[in-house]
């Protein structure tokens, strides 16, 4: 499509606003305005596009109807979602974007008259956008169902999984190539769409719930690339810039996230296939004794400590316990106890997720300590209070080379004088591996829902 | 290879580098909002959906384009709103640093 110069310039302005917005998102001070700047860019891009449209009344009416339907759905969902369900929400928005990208490519390709053969670049971009967009759509849907716990979070594996997935991927390549060289005509795109949807599902099923943030980040990058592909399909520079920015930054973010877990991306995405034996070997199993304490005992212990470090995990988030946690910190500080929060880079379900949740509970910014910042302080801490976290304090990451999480940087909670573990049960964490620290003689277990237990602790500290 | 394609490829390559450069300076605590914000940015696919909507002919194409516009709008609008909600909380906790001034 040939674009008039002023349209190209307006698109350039939108692209600049996207870049500025992303840049401002990198500092807490300017992050919010950064998001608004990017939103302004989107508004300009959409407004400019209205001028491009062939003005047929029916299309215009349908367009307005579709936007009027979609906008409130997105806005209301985004307003209503709980902070703990944020990762699922991002997965959903990402998935529908991927779906839209796939559909755009299909319509553009089907539209090309049968007798005029499409250019090679068009065919390749179309196949790319359809496949990547559909994988992102289906993969995000599975990530959503796992995080929303509509489906088991544990890796789902079955015999012959790898060959089956391989066969689907191979079929996609074959059909894709045949479409590109022109052997298969446009209806084959629907087959391609179906195959890519199947691959998206099959690809995310064997990945455990703990690794879902990395998967969402990867799928976010996928959607970006599919959008960039569509930019080539419809010849639109703002799609190329916007999509590519997200594709590149999302890929980088994905790598940083898997690095924080001490694993290669390949291991994370395909590791589940060998997982069964590992967990058998790693789990010493049998009945080992753990020490559990009452809320009163632990409350007294906390009240007479000098320094307490709270290690929050996803269990705190699901129990909606961040407010009570802050209350506990407040009563402790009133007694002169120093309280900090040790935030593991992948605590919660996404990097930074725990910071968002604690900020919601008005925990002062200075009390939130990064792993590097706090790790040496555990030695001098009287109590490490582990609330609904597990894998991020598992010493197996340091000590047992056979463990799936070996090499992951962890919080040195085991170095504290006492460790209090608040857990619902002895069930292993999201990674599905046993935690030695639970059996440590320094460890006291406090079983129960994190919110209930913390409430009891607040009362116990007040009484002490 | 025509001039437009050369332009598009140039834009693409430059945007790849820009994408890496922009994110490399983001602190960990902002990763979730950043992912959400970049998720909203690819909502720009709405532009593509609008273009094909206006070019579509026949019920099938129009129907598919219609769905694409709805999905893209959800991505764009929901993405920015949810990111704003996350970042709203970061503002209030900037400790007395001049939030009042």
Image: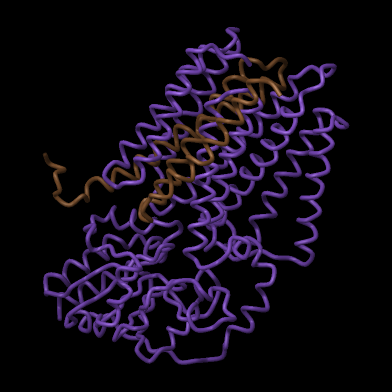
| Residue A424, position as x, y percentages in the image | 42, 73
| Residue B8, position as x, y percentages in the image | 60, 27
Nearest the eye: A309 or A452: A309
Nearest the eye: A439 or A213: A213
Q: Which chain is brown?
A: B
The C terminus of chain A sits in image quarter:
bottom left
Question: Residue sitting at 17 percent across and 66 percent down?
Answer: A330
Is B9 situated left or right of A32 in this image?
right
| Residue A24, position as x, y percentages in the image | 34, 40
Question: Residue sitting at 47 percent across and 51 percent down?
Answer: A87
Relative height, residue A380 to residue A107 (above, below): below
Residue A318: image quadrant is bottom left
Question: Residue sitting at 71 percent across and 29 percent down?
Answer: A106
Relative height, residue A311 to residue A171 (above, below): below
Q: Which chain is purple?
A: A
Relative height, residue A327 to residue A439 (above, below): above
């Amino acid at each position: 499509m040939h674009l008039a110069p002023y349209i190209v310039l307006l698109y350039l302005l939108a692209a600049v606003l996207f870049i500025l917005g992303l840049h401002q998102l990198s500092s807490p001070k300017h992050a919010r305005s950064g998001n608004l700047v990017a939103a302004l860019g989107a508004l300009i891009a959409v407004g400019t596009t209205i001028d491009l449209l062939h003005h047929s009344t029916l299309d215009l009416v349908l367009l307005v109807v579709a936007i009027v339907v979609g906008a409130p759905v997105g806005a209301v969902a985004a307003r209503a979602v709980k902070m703990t369900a944020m990762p699922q929400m991002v997965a959903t928005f990402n998935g529908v974007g991927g779906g839209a990208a796939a559909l755009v490519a299909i319509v553009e390709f089907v539209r090309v008259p049968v007798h005029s053969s499409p250019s090679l670049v068009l065919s390749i971009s179309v196949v790319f956008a359809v496949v990547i967009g559909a994988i992102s759509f289906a993969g995000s849907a599975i990530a959503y169902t796992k995080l929303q716990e509509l489906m088991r979070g544990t890796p789902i594996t079955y015999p012959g999984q790898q060959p089956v997935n391989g066969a689907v991927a191979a079929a996609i390549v074959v059909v894709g190539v045949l479409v590109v060289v022109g052997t298969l005509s446009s209806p084959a795109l629907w087959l391609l769409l179906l195959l890519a949807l199947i691959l998206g599902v099959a690809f995310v099923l064997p990945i455990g719930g703990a690794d879902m943030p990395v998967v969402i980040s990867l799928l976010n990058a996928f959607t970006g690339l599919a959008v960039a592909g569509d930019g080539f399909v419809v010849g639109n520079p703002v799609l190329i810039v916007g999509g590519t920015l997200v594709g590149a930054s999302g890929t980088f973010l994905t790598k940083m996230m898997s690095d924080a877990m001490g694993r290669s991306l390949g291991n994370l995405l395909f590791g589940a296939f060998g997982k069964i034996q590992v967990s058998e070997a790693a789990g010493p199993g049998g009945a080992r004794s753990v020490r559990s304490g009452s809320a009163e005992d632990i409350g007294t212990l906390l009240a007479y400590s000098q320094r307490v470090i709270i290690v929050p995990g996803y269990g705190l988030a699901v129990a909606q316990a961040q407010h009570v946690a802050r209350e506990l910190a407040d009563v402790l500080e009133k007694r002169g106890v120093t309280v900090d929060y040790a935030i593991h880079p992948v605590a919660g379900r996404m990097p930074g997720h725990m910071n968002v949740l604690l900020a919601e509970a008005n925990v002062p910014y200075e009390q939130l300590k990064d792993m590097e910042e706090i790790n040496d302080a555990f030695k001098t801490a009287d109590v490490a209070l582990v609330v609904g976290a597990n894998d991020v304090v598992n010493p197996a990451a340091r000590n047992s080379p056979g463990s799936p999480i070996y090499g992951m940087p962890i919080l040195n909670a085991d170095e504290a004088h006492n460790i209090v573990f608040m857990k619902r049960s002895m069930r292993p964490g999201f990674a599905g591996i046993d935690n030695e620290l639970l059996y440590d003689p320094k460890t006291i277990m406090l079983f129960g829902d994190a919110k209930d237990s913390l409430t009891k602790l607040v009362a116990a500290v007040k009484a002490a | 290879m025509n001039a437009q394609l050369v332009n598009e490829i140039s834009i693409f390559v430059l945007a790849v580098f820009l994408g890496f450069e922009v994110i490399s300076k983001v602190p960990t605590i902002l990763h979730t909002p950043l992912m959400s914000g970049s998720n909203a940015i690819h909502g720009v696919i709405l532009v593509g959906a609008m273009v094909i909507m206006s070019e579509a002919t026949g019920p099938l194409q129009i129907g598919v384009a219609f769905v694409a516009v709805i999905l893209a709008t959800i991505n764009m609008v929901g993405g920015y709103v949810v990111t704003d909600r996350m970042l709203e909380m970061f503002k209030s906790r900037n400790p007395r640093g001049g939030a009042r001034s």
